[in-house]
């Protein structure tokens, strides 16, 4: 088994044993990483890599958008869907125009969402760990 195969197996196991919340954060981390790499590729004038990283980021955003439950999520799901649509539109514009500014805007949106989810998950875990007060 090569190091690359070992890492792939580790990564697969990590995903399979993660909670839904951890997977959500991993998806955001991957989208952010690919967005940063796409920006870097534009700066380096590596057009092929730019397209690859934008495509990976968009695949993640599409998956996040498709996983929204509008019945349960209501207005929040609707707002998230709008933000995902914006990220898809802006990243497409960046890809076509070879312009990093729309990607920087995408990065801002993704980072804000990641930070918000991370804090919400942390709060939820803390609430679950605290024993309920007896009245």
Image (cartoon, rainbow, N blue to C red):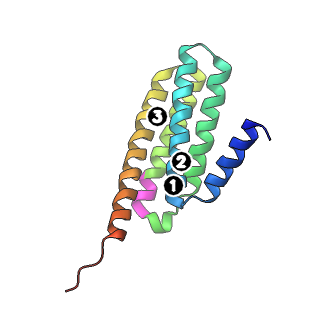
Tell whether label 1 touches label 2 (CB within 8 Å): yes
Callout 2: helix, strand or loop?
helix
Callout 3: helix, strand or loop?
helix
Image quadrant assignment for residue 101: top left
Q: Position of residue 79 (x, y in %)?
A: 42, 52
**Residue 78 magenta:** yes
Q: Position of residue 19 (x, y in %)?
A: 54, 61
Reading the image, the residue beneath label 3 is 106
The residue located at (57%, 31%) in the rendering is 92
Between residue 89 and residue 7, name the one nearer to us.
7
Q: Look at the image and tell me in which quarter the C terminus lies.
A: bottom left
Residue 98 visible? The answer is no
Marks 1/3: CA distance?
A: 21 Å
Callout 1: helix, strand or loop?
helix
Image quadrant assignment for residue 34: top right
User: Looking at the image, is mark 1 or mark 3 nearer the viewer?
Assistant: 1
Image quadrant assignment for residue 45: top right
In the depicted structure, whether residue 1 falls above or below residue 34: below
Q: Look at the image and tell me in which quarter the N terminus lies.
A: top right
In the depicted structure, whether residue 13 falls above or below residue 114: below
Reading the image, the residue beneath label 1 is 22
Marks 2/3: CA distance?
A: 17 Å
Image position of 34 (left or right of 114): right
Image position of 112 (left or right of 8): left
Q: Position of residue 99 (x, y in %)?
A: 52, 20
| First-in-chain label (1 vs 3) | 1
- Name the mark on residue 135: none
The residue located at (30%, 71%) in the rendering is 130
Reading the image, the residue beneath label 2 is 26
Please report the bounds of the magenta region as a residue range. 74-79
Give neighbour class at mark 3: few <14, some 14-19, many 20+ (Cα, 10 Å): many
Q: Position of residue 76 (x, y in %)?
A: 40, 58
């Amino acid at each position: 088994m090569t190091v690359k195969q070992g890492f792939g197996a580790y990564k697969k196991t990590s995903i399979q044993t993660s909670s839904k919340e951890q997977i959500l954060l991993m998806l955001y981390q991957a989208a952010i990483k690919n967005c940063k790499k796409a920006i870097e590729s534009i700066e380096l004038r590596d057009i092929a890599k730019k397209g690859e990283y934008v495509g990976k980021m968009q695949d993640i955003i599409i998956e996040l958008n498709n996983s929204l439950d509008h019945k349960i999520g209501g207005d929040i799901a609707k707002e998230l869907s709008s933000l995902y649509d914006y990220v898809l539109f802006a990243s497409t514009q960046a890809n076509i125009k070879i312009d990093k500014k729309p990607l920087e805007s995408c990065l801002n949106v993704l980072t804000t969402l990641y930070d918000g989810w991370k804090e919400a998950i942390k709060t939820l875990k803390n609430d679950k760990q605290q024993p309920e007060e007896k009245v």
